[in-house]
Amino acid sequence: MQTAVFGGGCFWCTEAVFRMLKGVSNVEPGYAGGSTGSPQAAPTYQEVSGGDTGHAEVIRVTYDPAIISYEDLLTVFFGSHDPTTPNRQGADVGEQYRSIILYGSEGERATAERVAKEIGESLKDGTRVVTQIVPLGTFFPAEEYHQKYFEKNKSAPYCMLVIEPKVEKIRKRFAELVEGHA
């Protein structure tokens, strides 16, 4: 098993998207890419939301590379959010919602840079990919109430109005990568 860390806006949304992929055994929302002043001090949701730490809302994906490749994960990552908008995804605004890939190896870095470049070159409207590609420092798991948020709160308005449509869009767009698809 391997892990990958991505931030593409609200971690409730990205967690729901990646949980449905073949070969993914776990998805954990958390925080990375910032600093609390102490490398061991975990940021709180309130600190991250307030923009006090520079962390992004991210997910740590545990996956089986024999079933789904890192490149496939990147394809879903780039296809599930807008990588051309700095510090914003939909109504979620702030540095904590930035598009970010936190790599754990030089191989991941090279693949992420190549895929981001390919996507950037495919854009026809003059926009550019602003996704940060940086080394993974410390990943801090989010508080328990953020874990499996969509699964536990499907009838909540945010889940019905924002997450469910995103999940359905990704389920159709990447059907061959979705668990349960023949």
Image: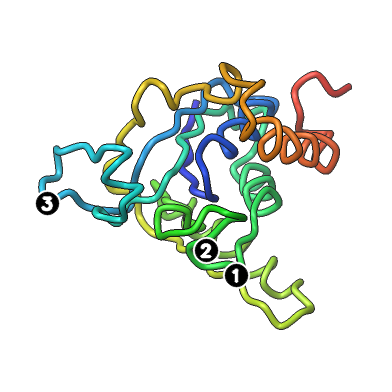
In the rendered structure, which amino acid carries the disc numbered 2? Thr
Q: Which residue is mark 3?
A: 37
In the rendered structure, the answer to whether residue 31 lies left or right of residue 25 reads: left
Q: Quadrant of residue 151?
A: top right
For disc 2, the neighbor class at 10 Å (few under 14, some 14 to 19, many from 20) is many
Q: What secondary structure is marked by label 3?
A: loop
Up-down relation of residue 38 to residue 158 (above or below): below
Dot 1 and dot 2 residues touching (CB under 8 Å): yes
Q: Residue at the location (51% across, 60% down)?
A: 110
In-front residue for pair 27/168? 168
In x, y percent, where is residue 69? 64, 39
Mark 2 — residue?
A: 131
CA–CA distance in space, label 3 to label 1: 30 Å
Q: CA distance from mark 2 to mark 3?
A: 24 Å
Instruction: Name the amino acid, label 3.
Output: Gly
- Residue that badge 1 annotates: 129
Between the residue at mark 1 and the residue at mark 2, the CA separation in whole angstroms equals 6 Å
Please tell me which residue lies in front, 10 or 127. Answer: 10
For residue 164, above or below residue 147? below
